[in-house]
Amino acid sequence: MRALNIITLLLIIVGGLNWGLVGAFEFNLVDALFGAGSVFSKAVYVLVGVSAIWQLIPFVRSMSVGETAAQRAHGRY
């Protein structure tokens, strides 16, 4: 579970950095690397989206039971 959390966080970071590049410089790194509209670009976008959904689980827990308790419940301590 910890490895999955790390992978999903990394994918969310990649997505955030890509959006930052798009907003600041109109440069889409994912499309530049894999080709605009390619299967690989779409796969990256889907994985980033699924990663964000996955990370909603600890976020919702932290809102309902407190951050420290949520981290323990999610196996981070």
Image (cartoon, rainbow, N blue to C red):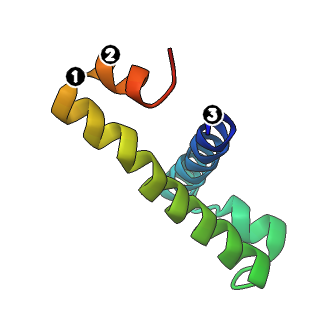
Mark 3 lies on residue: 2
Q: Please determine whether, in this image, residue 48 is positioned above or below residue 63.
A: below
Q: Say which amino acid is labelled 2.
A: Thr
Which element type, helix, strand or loop, lies under badge 2? helix
- Residue 66 image-quadrant placement: top left
Q: Please determine whether, in this image, residue 58 is positioned above or below residue 56.
A: above
Dot 2 alpha-carbon crowd within 10 angstroms: few under 14, some 14 to 19, many 20 or more: few
- Spatial separation of the CA atoms under disc 2 and disc 1: 6 Å
Q: Say which amino acid is labelled 1.
A: Gly
Dot 1 alpha-carbon crowd within 10 angstroms: few under 14, some 14 to 19, many 20 or more: few
Which element type, helix, strand or loop, lies under badge 1? loop
- Spatial separation of the CA atoms under disc 1 and disc 3: 20 Å
Q: Earlier in the sequence, mark 2 or mark 3?
A: 3
Residue 24, image x and y in percent?
Answer: 51, 50
Give the residue at x 61% y 39%. Answer: 1
The reply to whether dot 2 and dot 1 touch (C-beta < 8 Å) is yes
Q: Please determine whether, in this image, residue 27 is positioned above or below residue 73.
A: below
Q: Earlier in the sequence, mark 1 or mark 3?
A: 3
Depth order, front residue of 29/12? 12
Mark 1 lies on residue: 66
Depth order, front residue of 6/1? 1
Residue 40, image x and y in percent?
Answer: 78, 75
Q: Is residue 73 left or right of residue 60?
A: right
Depth order, front residue of 20/59? 59
Give the residue at x 58% y 52%. Answer: 21
Find residue 31 and name its label: none
Mark 2 lies on residue: 68
Q: Is residue 28 left or right of residue 22?
A: right
Q: Please determine whether, in this image, residue 71 is positioned above or below residue 38.
A: above
Residue 65, image x and y in percent?
Answer: 20, 27
